[in-house]
Image: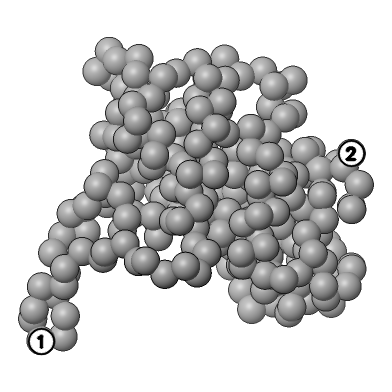
Amino acid sequence: MTAQPVRPERSGPETASVMDVSPFKPSLVKVVFRDMTPMHVSRSAACAAASVTRTVLTEIIDGARGAAAEEARKKLIARDLLSAIDRNVELEVGSKWYDHSPTFRGLTGVVYDAEGVIVPPRKRSRSRKPSAVAGAHRFEAGVRKLLRRQGVAAAPAMVRDLDGIASVFLTDLARDAAVVVREGGVKRFGTVTLVMPGEPAPPPLLEDSLRDPSARRGDRRTIGRDDILAATTMQLFGNLRQRALTEAHEAARNTSAG
């Protein structure tokens, strides 16, 4: 998909007081983390992960709303989701969901194997092993609440895709947070910062304790708020990453590190 540096400003009806409460419950976030790692997840970490997910979904909805407005529509449809992601590369998250969604089918073209044979689309697995796709339905209520807060309605297909993207994104966030804990920081990822062409490099996004892997606080059995923030830098970049980090920090500021 062709990425263009389009970043519409957030213009929805959501107020600061509403933004303080994530529609994604920390208890559901912990369920996703338990599927990925046996590590304990602090309440502040769960709140930070819920906040980051809310930020990501909010930006996607804003982009989709802009696409719908161009066609004088108030109800979001699956095509608006594709348009939002195509216009802003920062929104291309939770990509593992794309293989399971009819909305994204065919966007990458026909895939061939090494012998030139067409690779058929991936079929749904019947494995009982927990997965982000199997658990996508967990976040439907949160997605619908977020849509209402943004003052928009969405077709069932759009809700389904936002649901799936949220679940896959949280799963990836849980995996990377566990890596941060095990390795004592983000040392594997160096200091590379992704920016759009023509844009100045953003200021440092993390506190000194996160930039310096040796300074990580806490034991190796608990995922804390800072581990979520570090994982966020692996999953997101650009303005979206900056907003997600800022809002997650605010969401977890007054939460005890349970």
Viewer-proximal residue, 165 or 227?
165
Above/below status of 44 relative to 146: below
1 or 2: tag closer to the N-terminus: 1
Q: Residue 238 vs residue 188: left or right? A: left
Above/below status of 38 relative to 149: below
Which of the 4 quarters of the picture holds residue 127?
Answer: bottom left
Residue 86 place in picture, x, y as percent: 31, 43
Above/below status of 183 relative to 225: below
Check disc 1: other Cα within 10 Å, few if <14, some if 14-19, many if 20+: few
Q: Find disc 1 in the rendering and name its residue.
A: 115
Residue 104 place in picture, x, y as percent: 26, 49
Q: Find disc 2 in the rendering and name its residue.
A: 254
Q: Residue 102 vs residue 115: left or right? A: right
Query: What's the residue at 69%, 77% (across, down)?
Result: 187
Viewer-proximal residue, 53 or 210?
53
Under mark 2, the amino acid is Asn
Check disc 2: other Cα within 10 Å, few if <14, some if 14-19, many if 20+: few
Q: Residue 183 vs residue 104: left or right? A: right
- Marks 1,2: beta carbons within 8 A: no
